[in-house]
Amino acid sequence: MRLTDLHIRRIFQALTGVMVMVIVVGGFSLFSKEDTRQFASTLTPPPLTKETPETRKVKRKKSESQLNNISETQYEQSLENLKRESEKDPKNPLLYEQMGDLFFLKKDFSLAGQSYEIAALLDAKNMTRQVKYVRSLLARRKVIEAERVLLTLDANDESVLLYRGIVSAFLNKPKDSKVALSKISQSTNPSLAQQALVVLNAYTTYESATDAQPVYLQALLSRAFNELGEYELSIALGLEAIKQKTDYRDVWLVIGHSYLSQNMWNDAESALLKAVSLDATQSLAHVLLGFTEESLVKPMEAATHFKKALDLGYEPAFEIAQKRADNLYEAGVFDEALTAYTDLINKNSAQLKPEAYIRPMVIYIERQNEPERALELARVLVDTHPDDATAINLFGWALLSVGEDGAAEDALNSALARDEKLPAAHLNLGKLSQRRGDLSQALEYYRNAYTYGTERNDISITNAAAALYNAIAKTIN
């Protein structure tokens, strides 16, 4: 399961609220110990049903394109629709802008730039589209070209002035940068004003430091660009700082996070491992390494780093504890995963979403043949989530597993009353109908599970439903 851009940025953004400068052996620190403990993230829940190794591989491959909850299927459909509309209305700049937005989300910055450039040419007076084109240039590190474009745009437009200040900061033109950004910091648009302050605060911190070297300003600006989502600028300036000071732990951390945000997993791994080699007590580095290793489909390594972060006192702990349990499950270390899930549920049952109960129930039912233990978990779940369709479905699945077919049917129908298209409930009702020998009814439920699972992009459900449907169809034919 892949972390989305929003999740990654939430983790790092909370570090940027207060810049605490600390003198440490070897240079200036970008983060205080307190910085690393004051943020929270919302993590993607695990899948709805059991996964086989084959479906896990497919799901991971698909999830590479999942950004901000846009699935590969949705992305392709949206792009196809926009292309079709642009053929009908080839001079509509909005269509090209929206295509650029999709490409930018996919991190295909070259195609994003082409689309934004067309939109900008079709609507030269729209500064929003012009700035999007500039951002696509920055994402490809075409900074000089971006500066040239900015100088041709309306200097009275605040977004243009903001990016003039950002580009000037990168090009080591502090005077030009401060002039532009100081104007924007007074803007009535709070978002633009805050973005300007991110860079201005980097200058203020540097100038207030005693005997600070230029490499410290590079480090501060690298971090500022990271916070602004200009990850390529962050990486480029961070690497310049590293050339001068190879053991700058916090810069390696910023670079690693920027690579992670750009889905450049191998580069992120290298940078973050370097940060850990310089200081293994930094819990944030282990958290980011955990996400990186997960993205590289190295679940055991991910689980190891998540555990190290927890051992170092990382907060909030329960999200990372869940990620550790999920990766242990992915690694096939089921006994250890079950222990981790059980501890997580015992400590955080009220905070956990129903989906967090699925994998421990899978282990109990399908790995350890202990359905009664799964039913105990399911009872805890419905006590804390009495009206949740997924929770009630899991309760029905557990009842089905211990042979309480009547109660299972009631629970599964109750789940469908709350969500009539819940794929897992249809799948479980299909299993119940098949057990009773009503194959035509089972086929209908499996067909529904497949259809609704496809609509919701739930590959594990669609695969299971297809396999069960085809197995029955063969016996009938």
Image (cartoon, helix red, strand yellow):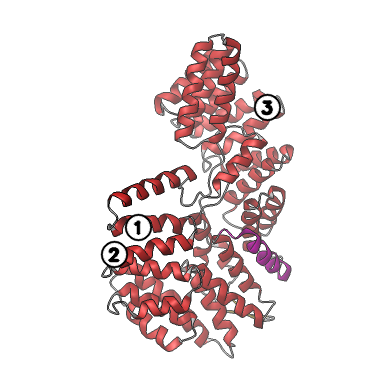
Residue type at tag 1:
Tyr
* Residue drawn at point x = 66 percent, y = 57 percent: 309
Pointer 3 residue: 366
Residue type, mark 2 in image? Leu
Estimate how packed mark 3 is, as few (under 14), some (14 to 19) or many (20 or more) residues with alpha carbons within 10 Å: few
Query: Which residue bears the numbered disc 1?
Result: 96
Up the image or down, 435 lies above or below 82; here it is: above
For marks 2 and 3 on the same chain, the one whose residue lies earlier in the sequence? 2
Task: Give 371 or 181, whichever is nearer the viewer.
Answer: 181
Q: Callout 1 environment at 10 Å: few (<14), some (14 to 19), or many (20+)?
A: many
How far apart are labels 3 and 1 at the CA level? 49 Å
Give the quarter of the image for residue 471: top right
Q: Quadrant of the C terminus?
A: top right
Q: How far is mark 2 from mark 3, CA to CA?
A: 59 Å
Residue 438 painted magenta: no
356 left or right, relative to 271 = left
Report the amino acid beneath label 3: Glu
In this view, the residue in front, 373 or 457, is: 457
How far from the left and from the top, in percent, is residue 27?
65, 82
Magenta stretch bounds: 263-279
Are the two marked residues, 1 and 2, in contact with CB atoms closer than 8 angstroms? yes
Q: Main secondary structure of the magenta part?
A: helix
Viewed as shown, does residue 228 lie left or right of 98? right
Determine the secondary structure under disc 1. helix
Q: Is residue 156 above or below residue 367?
A: below
Q: Categorize mark 2 by other alpha carbons within 10 Å: few (<14), some (14-19), many (20+).
A: some
Give the foreground label among 2 and 3. Answer: 2
Q: Secondary structure at mark 3?
A: helix
